[in-house]
Amino acid sequence: MTSTASAQSPLAVTVSGLCKRFPGVTALDDVSLDFATGRITAVLGENGAGKSTLMSILAGLQKPDEGVVHVGGRPVDRFSATALLHDHGVALVPQEIALAAERSVAENILMGQEPGVLPSRRRMVGRATSLLDEVGSTIDPRQRAGALSTADQQLLLIVRAIARDCRVLILDEPTTSLTGQEVASLFTLLRRLRDAGTAVIYVSHRLPEIFEICEDIHVLRDGRHVASFGTAQVTPQQLVAAMVGREVAERPYDRRAEGRSVLSLRGLTSAAFADVDLDVRAGEVVGVAGLPDSGRSELLAAIFGAVPSRGSIHLDGEKVTLRSPRDAIKCGIGYVPAERRAQAIFPDMSVGRNAVVLDVEDLSWFGMVPPRRLRALADERIRANDVRGSIAGSITGLSGGNQQKVIIGRWLARKPKLLLLDDPTRGVDVGAKEEIHDRIDGAARQGAAVLMSSSDLPELLRTCDRIVVLSQGRVAGTELAIDATEESIMRLATRDVAPSASRPEGK
Amino acid sequence: MSTTLSPRAPRDIARPTNGQPLKKLLYQRELGVILALAALCLFGVFGTDGFRSTDNLLNVGQQASLIGIMAVGATFVIITGEIDLSVGSIYALASMCVGLMLQAGANWIVALLLGVAVGAAAGLVNGLLTVFLRLPSFIVTLGTLSIFRGLALLITNAAPISLNDSDPNVAAFSYLGTGRVLGIPMQLVIMVMVFIVGGFALRFTRFGFHVYAVGGSREAARLCGIATGRVRIASFVIQGSLAALAGIVGLAFLLYAQGTTGVGLELLVITAVIIGGAALFGGSGTMLGTLVGVLLIATLQNVLILAGVSAFWQTIVIGVVIIAAVALDTWVRRRQ
């Protein structure tokens, strides 16, 4: 890595006064921070704190609205992926790796850097081999890139960055799908790059990893840079406090009367989570907290039969087998998925039709649906849920909050005995959020059992009776909402609950 | 023409203007094709001789009818977000099967029903392969386009079938293609009936609702408990049955069939549906739009012939119309 010699400045990247606004959200608000050469610097923050926006600006995928970025002392005047990669030497290893899966490893590494006008296969393989040797890898450069493991694909992207003499390497949540062994060898490689003078920017919210590999830590919260620490001078508690840091302003709900046990999971296991035991009673709102990769979304989807799982699900004391959402709906389960646009709304349908899509079955008479009754029902539904918008207008014309009121109203009208809500207020404005919380409380008061996952901890603390915290797909702990704090939940969520942890088998 | 176009003002709360621009747009979208058709007719009336004669107009209707019958099926398939390229082959296969049965002396009603069943079975194959092998329907029906065509040729070893209408059974059958009801060609009557039934099914039934839901967002439909696979398979079966019906009506008109009839029909059918405003990736489209699309293609062909434009230019003009119609549609969507 000859490039590092040229980087004399101790600061590889300087960000000053960076602002980025999206419709309705300020993703970055006057952020100023530095990244030093020859050090590994963590960028830490909750969901929506602005980490991803900052990284995509540094990689040239987005343009800042205001502010300046200097790389190696030179200001960046053109924000495009090629400009940052070629002119400034900044490479990003994204969380979702995109490769030319059908082409060879060598072609992928040297893509856009092929030697000569007519690159010979032999020369490309030779160059790729020497680069791979440099990082101590034994991947065959002639292999198809799509056949590599995630860890090797990541390695390939790092090697690609080395091939371009990158001085700044950004890794976005690199360990999400790696095994312990793979993480260890990734860290060894990162330390070697650091020692050779590369500035490594490490985005993660796994505290143990950050303490293991990073020297400096920047914390973002709500789009602002709130604190910076040297790893040696900070405790996990201080970091969590900096990440969370806001007050719970809203009034908590009064206690609800709890009834019979509605949902009971024993040893539920899928690709994303393992051995989950969980009970929800009628009238109870149980929260599921955890980092995005903790398996909380998949847990709800599995209970709804939308993703396969093993283990046992008891509903009202009876064992049920749910092979599809259809089965789950027949058993009286409702589900509001997290990805509203992709999973919940019908973008070509009107607001009214979106609201009554679950009722078509019941309204139909010998397969026919009387349009007048459908319209009357839609009208009633829109009014009952206080949706601000025209019933005949397109659902995509509504604000996120009003869309979500339509979706939740769709399920509440069926009076499900179990309601699964996956991040129900994601992308929802404050006013609508309050209304949705009231709806959830109301459903529980009418006897529904509610299981709700959220990335928003204050929301869970406010609306839930109990909070189950998942970490790496396993239950890390359960807390009563009245005793829990954001800090106590974050501590559980970032705890290392590796499957190797001594855990007595069976009961 | 969906219920979103209710002429009644939205009775509910705040911002009633929210839906208005879209309503107008949707209205205009169908209106656009209708206006294009009207303009074409005006050109026909004033720019050519003989366009407005009753005979010629009925002739246009007759030409439209075979494509129209198939386009009703294609509307279902395309709204669910699928595509069926094998309709021309199913058309040929069904007409050959019915031709053989009639030659063998089978009762024409039985032959008709069995012919439609052959089409339904072909559609079922398309649907099952698409859903259970999780293949794009483009690929599946590209394959069955070839397979069904091969079968149509195979059953008579590529020999054409000629029916003799001195046989009273065949004469009764030929009424489907050549008969007239109150002066209107039977083919046209069949097409209109198919459109009415298809339009009703799409707009007023649970199945129709599910067709829109599956095409709009298959994942959202699955999470709402809609049997998405069944809906898609049913659409292919409808398409297969109607392609067969068209083939049988075509046979009744000509009393002649060969394994190579109906080559390229799939493109005209898909063109008609797309011009009619259905989105190629599913979720939207109406029967009225498809009907107008079918009439537009038939009128265009007729007017070009009457205006003395060569057959080669006709195909070029149709190509231009497809691209222009879809470009206009995309442009309108982007503006909304």
Image (tube, coloured by chain):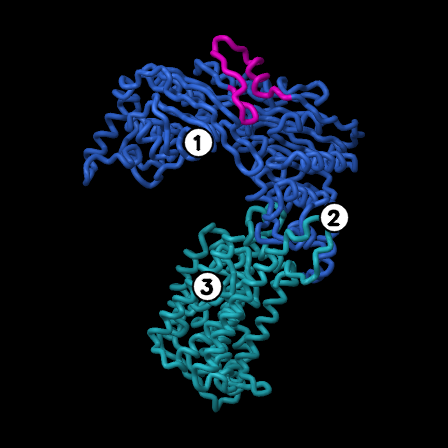
Chain colours: A blue, B cyan
Classify mark 2: helix, strand or loop.
helix
Q: Report the side of A188 relative to A482 (left or right).
A: left
> In this orientation, does residue B117 appear?
no
- Magenta span of residues: A219-246
Q: Amino acid at mark 1?
A: Ser
* Residue A167 or residue A27, whichever sits in front: A27
Q: Position of residue A347 (x, y in %)?
A: 57, 50
Number of residues whose C-alpha sits closer than 10 Å to that of mark 2, classed few (under 14), some (14–19) or many (20 or more): some
The mark found on residue A383 in the picture is: 2
- Report the residue at 68% width, 54% height from top: A361
Is residue A356 within the magenta segment? no
Q: Position of residue A304 (x, y in %)?
A: 63, 40
Work out which residue is located at the far right of the displayed protein and give it: A257
* Residue A185 or residue A100, whichever sits in front: A100
Q: Report the side of A70 relative to B225 (left or right).
A: left
The residue to which callout 1 is attached is A56
Q: Amino acid at mark 3?
A: Ala
Q: Within the image, what quadrant is residue A91 found in? A: top left
B317 up-or-down from B162: above or below: above
Number of residues whose C-alpha sits closer than 10 Å to that of mark 3, classed few (under 14), some (14–19) or many (20 or more): some
Q: Position of residue A436 (x, y in %)?
A: 70, 37
The subunit letter for the residue under badge 3 reads B
A484 up-or-down from A306: above or below: above
Is residue A234 within the magenta segment? yes
Q: Position of residue B213 (x, y in %)?
A: 59, 53
- Report the residue at 37% width, 17% height from top: A11
